[in-house]
Amino acid sequence: MAKIAVLGSGTGSNFQALLEEFADEIVLVISDQPGAGILEKAKAAGIPTALEEGGPRLSARILKRLGGIDLICLAGYMRLVKDPLLSAFPKRILNIHPSLLPMYPGKAAWEQVLADKAEVTGCTVHYVDAGIDTGEVILQEKVAILMNDTAKTLHARIQIAEHRIYPEAVRLVLKKMTGGAL
């Protein structure tokens, strides 16, 4: 059985979607925010948690906590992942982003999409690399933009799609990591 660590900064809605599919595999949740909802959700599920608030050598400090971990999932983690963490987990760190990458990388993608009057957006699960939302795409799902959409309504619909595709992408990656057997 694979061991998964989840890194998050926020409420933990994507973590919850992963937890529903991988409750036995998620063995650690790390946040950089002391009051993050993801920590409370993890504690309620009996999953060990850790707080790493940033500063020098953040990636090195996180890496020390990840002994025996097979896969890292970022779930609303609002910091750049850097070496030595990246080199220790090549193609084993995943992120979910609220746009159809490579379009609209970075923060508040749904607001950028609305400002551009785009007709469609979506979400992307990708491998994490040294860039901002530039890693290889694993899975995407389109979300139509409605005429009366606000940033809030569009973001809510994108999150529904995220909760659908993130567990699916994790399954695909785990299957690939284990040579097709899960």
Image (cartoon, grey):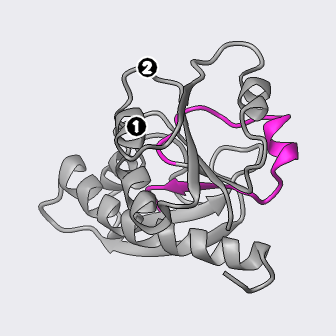
Instruction: Give the residue at mark 1.
Output: 43
Furthest-top residue in this view: 55
| Residue 20 pos. (x, y %) | 39, 64
Magenta span has 78?
yes
Residue 66 in picture, x, y percent from top left: 73, 40
Label 2, secondary structure: give it.
loop
* Mark 2 to mark 1 CA distance (whole Å): 13 Å
Locate residue 59: give its quadrant. top right
Of the residues shown, which amino acid type is indicated by label 1?
A: Lys
Q: Residue at x 35, y 34 (%)?
A: 40
Specify the quadrant of the image occupied by residue 164. bottom left
Q: Amino acid at mark 2?
A: Pro
Q: Which residues are magenta?
A: 75-101
In the foreground, 172 or 114: 172
Position of the N terminus, as image quadrant, is: bottom right
Q: Which quadrant of the view contains residue 54? A: top right
Q: Which residue is mark 2?
A: 34
Residue 154 % position (x, y): 25, 58
